[in-house]
Image: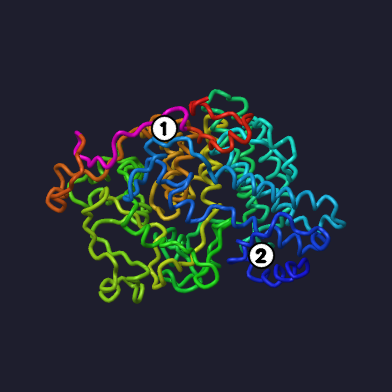
Amino acid sequence: MKYTLKAILILILGCLTHSCLDLDPKDQIADGNYWNSVTDYKLFANQFYSWTRDFSNSVYDAPHSDKRSDLIVDKGGTNVYSNGTNSIPASDNNYTDNYNRIRRANILLQKAETYDNPTDIAQYVGEAKFFRAYCYFELLQLYGDAIITKTPLDVTDPELKASRNDRSEVADLIIQDLKDAAGLLSATSAVESGRVGSEGAWAFLSRVALYEGTWQKFRGNTVRGKELLDIAANAAKEVINSKKFSLYAPVILGDSAQKYMFILEDVKSNPAGLQKSSNTEYIFSRRHDETLNPINKNITKECLANTQMISHKFAALYLCQDGLPIDKSPNMFMGYDKIESEYLNRDNRMIYTLCKPYGYFWSNENSRVNWTGDAADRASASIKGLIPTSGSGYNNQKWATERAVNTNYEGYDYPIIRYAEVLLNYAEAVFERDETISDEDLNISLNLVRNRINTQMPKLTNSFAQTYGLDMRTEIRRERTVELFNEGFRIDDLKRWKTAETEMPQNILGIKWTGTEYQTRWPNASYSKNSDGFLIIESGRKWEDKHYLYPLPTDQLQLNPNLKQNPGWGE
């Protein structure tokens, strides 16, 4: 049986970049015939790749989903995490799964200590370090303090009854693991597609250190915050200086480049027929393929003008083409009189992320015919000449394919870490570390993202901000929110900035109805309206300090009372 297991694992290895990344071998593999070859370590490490974020736990409801923020409301009903009515769960897989995964990473690291040729397995040791850090970061974000363990625990080990380590100790472990991983992993260009490379470790370190640095800074721990923000800026700069990645902006796709990046497949999925190999932006991604490893979620139906009700707050974040917010751009912002007015003269990402009224939109079931937008193409569209008359009035199109493919079988990749995030991490880390940022630093980071598909928009500079009375922090945060929308960042950003207490209790608003064309186009809009005439999609929301961390599940507190419940949750 021992040899049979090993033979089966080796046989399956060939499809690593697809479904085999979900391989989940048992923790207790017989030591007598395992851990003797590089292949053994590689096979064991394969399971790590099923632990990352994907569409199922980022776009759909999950701890990091924008559905738990102030940007998206699900038509399916009230989200208790978003409106502040969640309670202590009896059990929580987010908690137990991450500790189980940490144990598995520790198994590989323990076995590697006695391997004869450490350099031969450096990649897989680096992967174990990376994914241990990944799981501890999940625990840090959700629960704060966590039990640190660097060895695979048995049921008799005293650590199982230990109290949790302070979050700063956890953050330090994560940072060290990622630095170790960056030194062990091969360059992304040298590893198999789907595996994490050294730049992925640096990129993820920039995310971790930015998160914890701002968490500490905005809770009065300025020295600790500055130390971490310096780590974040330097880690992001490592990726920038590698010159291995760039923003996806093929000239042939023009200002639709970002839109089609999110739905790239190795069959025709965009007007130019570009494939995944053209994507220079994804540093580390969850790989999918229609045949070998489909997304296995009805992602297009979910995302195309359907269940995701977008808030007015998000729509209002998009700048006008003069680089100014709508309340500072009287010449460019066209108001709300007509149903398409607010989409005019705006950041191009608005019309490629949301669905502009009167537009044509295709889906997997009503797909493009020739990708030209001509009469035949339009006749095939799923939505023809959109007139919003449901939900919030703001409709999403991000993550919705335009090619013919069976539902659940879309095959585009999920960006676990992409270069745009690294650039935005750098800009924010520098600004929050120094309380200022130079035009030079803006130009190698934020402005690249801002101008990717807005080539005529003025860059954000210190003089531009001063001339028009803009707050630099607000503009950096705006850029991040717009660029990373519906990728699982917003609620975590509000928590680390300590602004959730301000943003989350606000009513979720939809389109402006009173005094606009919507009164005749959508006469039976049933939502109440606020004093400015905007639809009130959800009210009665609240946020307490306790909501900055999730409560620990009851079953874990019963098993180990030394864990102690998080503040505000009953202890």
Residue 176 horizontal/vertical position (percent): 71, 40
Instruction: Tell me how far mark 1 sits from mark 2, CA to CA.
Output: 43 Å
Residue 214, image quadrant: top right
Closest to the observer: 79 or 273?
Answer: 79
Say which residue appears at 49% left-offset and 68% top-offset.
265
* Left or right of 521 in this view: 35: right
Residue 541 lies in the magenta stretch: yes
Using the image, determine if residue 501 lies above or below residue 154. Answer: above
Model colouring? rainbow
Closest to the observer: 264 or 249?
Answer: 264
* Residue mark closest to the camera, 1 vs 2: 2
Q: Quadrant of the N terminus?
A: bottom right
* Left or right of 104 in this view: 31: right
Neighbor class of circle 2 (other Cα within 10 Å; few <14, some 14-19, many 20+) is few
Q: Which residue is mark 2?
A: 192
Give amino acid for label 1: Asp
* Left or right of 427 in this view: 135: right
Q: Which residue is mark 1?
A: 471
Indicate the secondary structure of the residue bearing disc 2. Answer: loop
Say which residue appears at 49% left-offset and 52% top-offset.
57
Residue 482 horizontal/vertical position (percent): 41, 46
Give amino acid for label 2: Glu
Closest to the observer: 183 or 454?
Answer: 183
Residue 268, image quadrant: bottom left
Looking at marks 1 and 2 on the same chain, the residue that comes earlier in the sequence is marked by 2
Q: Which residues are magenta?
A: 531-547
Indicate the secondary structure of the residue bearing disc 1. Answer: loop
